[in-house]
Amino acid sequence: MGWFSGLFGSTGDGTDAAARAREWETALERNELPAFVKTRLQETAENRRPWISTSAPGSLLAQRLRGIRPLGMVSGNCWFHYGYSWTHGHYRGWKTALQRLWQEAALMGANAVVDVTMRIRRMPGPENADHMDYGVIGTAVRLDGLPESSNPAVATVSALEFLRLLEAGIVPVGVAIGAQYSWLTPGAGLGGNMTGFGMNMSGAGPMGMGAGGMGWNQEWVALSRLAEQVRRQAIQQMRDDGLRIGSGILGQTQHSELLGFPADQENPYPRFLVRHIAIGTAILHDGRTVKRMGVVPVINAGNAGRLVPDDKSKEVI
Amino acid sequence: MADALEGLPQHAIERLKGLRDTSRRGGIFTSDFSVNEFLMVGEAGFEPLGLVVGSCIYHTGIQYAAWAKNQEMSVLSQAMYEARELAMTRMEEEAQALLADGVVGVRLEVKRMDWDKDILEFLAIGTAIAHRQGHPGFKGVNGKPFTSDLSGQDLWMLLQSGYRPLAMVMGSCVYHVAHQGVFRSLGNIGRNVEIPQFTQAMYDARELAMERMQHEAQEAAAEGVVGVQLHEGSHNWQPHVIEFFAVGTAVKAIEDAAIIPEKMTPQIVIPVND
């Protein structure tokens, strides 16, 4: 087992775990990276360590032929506790994580970060319901003909999509985020247009708070409006966020939640929570990179069955 | 071949001997290739020899983490690394016995057992392939068969770009995330704040896994690592313990220009039906 000793328990450069933890602590406080991370990233950018890419070989080849070179994987995360505002928490959590990823890429002199994937982590158990980790990972790349950059563009699109965009005269410049939430407590008469629903909220329906007990078809106006309002606000916020860096937003991810909470000791009426988060890549137009795109029909020799995801084909049947 | 076969059970030797040379009548190969994958491996100048497997059932040691401390669970990190390495090595031995140049499409799986949370099964499975003309320039580290989690299509693509696979490289780090004390938790109620202790644990664990994978690639004298994936998982461990596992294929530029397949330029295709 001698071959492990160099790899575990202590790190490559010999710092012990406690010293490493202290370095992390100071670095994160100062919005920086520990020295050993900086060294690794810089040595990777200078080809003194192997480059690392999330791309498959096909994508790498296409990138190389178009002057894009992988430098290394970069990442960032932020474990955030949202006490008074879920909206603010999501916004800050993602923004901080992206800022840290950007910082790593800037250290490598990257021109862009592509293939950025976003993931969340939670701790199990109800006591951990109000905090989670926002994590982002992507590949930092250098573009031929451009000087090293201290301000890399971050994009959630894949490397190939990034290339296609460049060829269409569009430069991805960053990630725009919008997050909003709102509560509705219909029983207390706070829900705006509640005509006809107020009395029924605490009685019939699933969980004892739905509108379904009335026996006829009718839109639940208050909740519809709230959901619509929250979504509009979230999209507006993403738009405003995107405007600061670009002129349009692509490749959006939208996530919505509508949660119902039954009445309890502190809340005499059932409540509803609507949340919406929208994330997209902000773009700018730049005519210098345009290449004409021709349309070539291609027949895919792959397994045709795979073109339709399983769940979809089941729906049809 | 005799040397390579030493240490393998008789039935395995018989099975492996039957596989070599697919063009000969009576020879048969096994693989888990799809049709396209099989054709592309052929296009790249290789032929499949047989499915090769390696497994390792591992009992992980016990390690207690301090409740309120961020720390690497080095006993578990080592266990996860060693067990995967053992499964991979056994798979490689099978490939060596086949006189293979490499193994593609390697899947590395970890299975947990319901009956004992300390026992994990590690399985490595892939298809051994050999260069049709027997060119020696494709061997991996120390003349052993290369290993790669790339598909047959990806292998063809990789060779097109002037690179050849060397070895699957990996880095693992099992980390204990500190519990927040009651006072600290109470202090956060109603506030929107980062929990730096948790952030730091995730950051450090991820960095360690990446660092180790890159170190392996460096040891293999690789130029780069392609198709890197970062997995996160908990294998029957307590909630605050998480594994970060980085894995990818280390690659190197092809030294002999004569074996780079005929150059093709891939087109970027935009499907119009999605």
Image (cartoon, coloured by chain):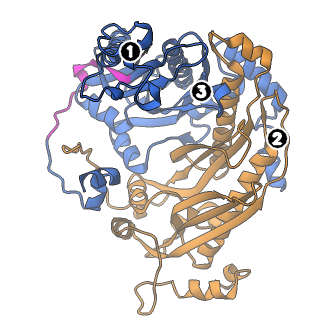
| Horizontal side of residue B96 vs A194, given as left or right | right
Q: Which residue is mark 2?
A: A9
Task: Identify the image quadrant of residue A203.
Answer: top left
Q: Which SS class for mark 3?
A: strand
Disc 3: host chain: A
The amino acid marked with disc number 2 is: Gly
Q: Give the Cα distance between marks 2 and 3.
A: 26 Å
x and y, in percent, of residue A50 in the image: 58, 42
> In the rendering, what colour is chain B?
orange
Residues behind callouts 2 and 3 on a single chain: yes
Q: Say which mark, if any, is on residue A199.
A: 1
> In the rendering, what colour is chain A?
blue
Q: Is residue A136 above or below residue A273?
A: below
Q: Which residues are magenta?
A: A279-294
The amino acid marked with disc number 3 is: Asp
The amino acid marked with disc number 1 is: Met
Local crowd at mark 2 within 10 Å, few (<14), some, or many (≥20)?
Answer: some
Q: Which residue is mark 3?
A: A133
Q: Is residue B23 above or below residue A137?
A: below
Q: Nearer the viewer, mark 2 or mark 3?
A: 3
Which residue is at a point 28% across and 51% down the rendered structure image? A315
Q: Nearer the viewer, mark 2 or mark 1?
A: 1
Disc 2: host chain: A
Q: Give the Cα distance between marks 3 and 1.
A: 41 Å
Q: Which SS class for mark 2?
A: loop
